[in-house]
């Protein structure tokens, strides 16, 4: 049986993901064949529809997990992504304990939460309904994003909310909320990032982060990061395409 993303989060080995924003399901198929542990299928900053997200989830091969970042902290979006068979949801911009509780409620069936019961791909279109409903709270991951300085100020109360499987730091939005948009290396932004990591490590909550630089992976792991999304599908295409063009132009 496939290892769930929640199991990967609990494993002592860090895991590697990348962002998917292009609509073709072959993108997820290729990235999973390339060996990524998980894919971050992004509905917050892309044109992806629910039908396209379902195709991505269907195309993922092997042990790779498919997580869906929903457009906002909205119970319907969370429920729809999970019903499509996502291995977990990433909920953006969770800035308070109340917002964290809202996400936990939406991502879990009763009695833990208030997720509504439907029949979708996750439930084998009905064939696996009883098994899925009995195990989904345990096997599907709820990842909240901390990506605003208000969330850093409210960190202790947010992390005290039961049911958060992981925290994913959004360094770019965090930098914007600190009037340093894009300057993720600024010492103040780095200090806020370290505060989040330290808080998560102290509570045993796996912490993840996005980075554009593969060279940053070693330092990330050393500073406590357990799951790292490196780069984006579109970035991989233009960076390798541009390297070929630049090589040609410099002949
Ligand atoms: C950010 O850096 O703000 C992100 O949300 C990356 O996914």
Image (cartoon, grey):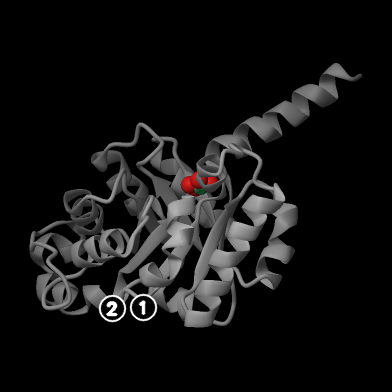
**Residue 138 - label:** 2
Name the residue nearer the viewer: 247 or 142: 142
Q: Residue 15, can we see it?
A: no
- Residue at 52 percent of width and 48 percent of height: 174
Name above or below for residue 244 compared with residue 41.
Answer: above
Name the residue nearer the viewer: 44 or 21: 44
Residue 179 occupies which quadrant of the picture? top right
- Tell me where residue 166 appears, x and y as whole percent: 43, 69
Name above or below for residue 84 compared with residue 55.
Answer: below
- Residue at 43 percent of width and 53 percent of height: 150
Name above or below for residue 124 compared with residue 24.
Answer: below
- Tell me where residue 222 appears, x and y as whole percent: 70, 72
The answer as to whether callout 1 falls within 8 Å of ligand 1 is no
- Tell me where residue 241 appears, x and y as whole percent: 68, 29
What whole-number distance in Å separates the C-alpha atoms at marks 1 and 2?
15 Å
- Tell me where residue 16 appears, x and y as whole percent: 57, 62
Q: Is residue 8 left or right of residue 124?
A: right
Q: Which residue is mark 1?
A: 1
Classify mark 1: helix, strand or loop: loop
Mark 1 surroundings: few (<14), some (14-19) or many (≥20) residues within 10 A: few
Name the residue nearer the viewer: 144 or 61: 144
- Residue at 38 percent of width and 60 percent of height: 144
Q: Residue 210, can we see it?
A: yes
Residue 125 occupies which quadrant of the picture? bottom left
């Amino acid at each position: 049986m496939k290892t769930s993303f929640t199991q990967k989060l609990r494993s002592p080995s860090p895991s590697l993901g990348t962002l998917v924003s292009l609509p073709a399901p072959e993108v997820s198929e290729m990235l999973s064949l390339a060996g990524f542990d998980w894919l971050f299928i992004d509905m917050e900053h892309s044109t992806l529809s629910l039908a396209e997200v379902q195709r991505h989830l269907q195309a993922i091969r092997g042990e790779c997990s498919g997580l869906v970042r929903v457009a906002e902290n909205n119970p319907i979006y969370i429920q729809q992504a999970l019903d499509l068979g996502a291995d977990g949801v990433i909920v953006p911009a969770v800035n308070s304990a109340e917002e964290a509780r809202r996400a936990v409620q939406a991502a879990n069936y009763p009695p833990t939460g208030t997720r509504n019961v439907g029949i979708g791909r996750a439930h084998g279109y009905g064939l696996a309904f009883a098994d899925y409903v009995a195990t989904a709270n345990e096997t599907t991951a709820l990842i909240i994003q901390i990506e605003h300085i208000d969330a850093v100020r409210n960190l202790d109360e947010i992390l005290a909310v039961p049911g958060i499987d992981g925290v994913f730091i959004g360094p770019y939005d965090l930098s914007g909320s600190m009037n340093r948009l894009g300057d993720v290396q600024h010492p103040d932004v780095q200090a806020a990032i370290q505060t989040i990591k330290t808080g998560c490590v102290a509570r045993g909550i796996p912490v993840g982060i996005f980075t554009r630089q593969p060279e940053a992976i070693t330092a990330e792991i050393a500073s406590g990061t357990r799951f790292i999304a490196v780069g984006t599908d579109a970035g991989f295409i233009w960076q390798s395409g541009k390297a070929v063009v630049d090589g040609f132009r410099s002949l």
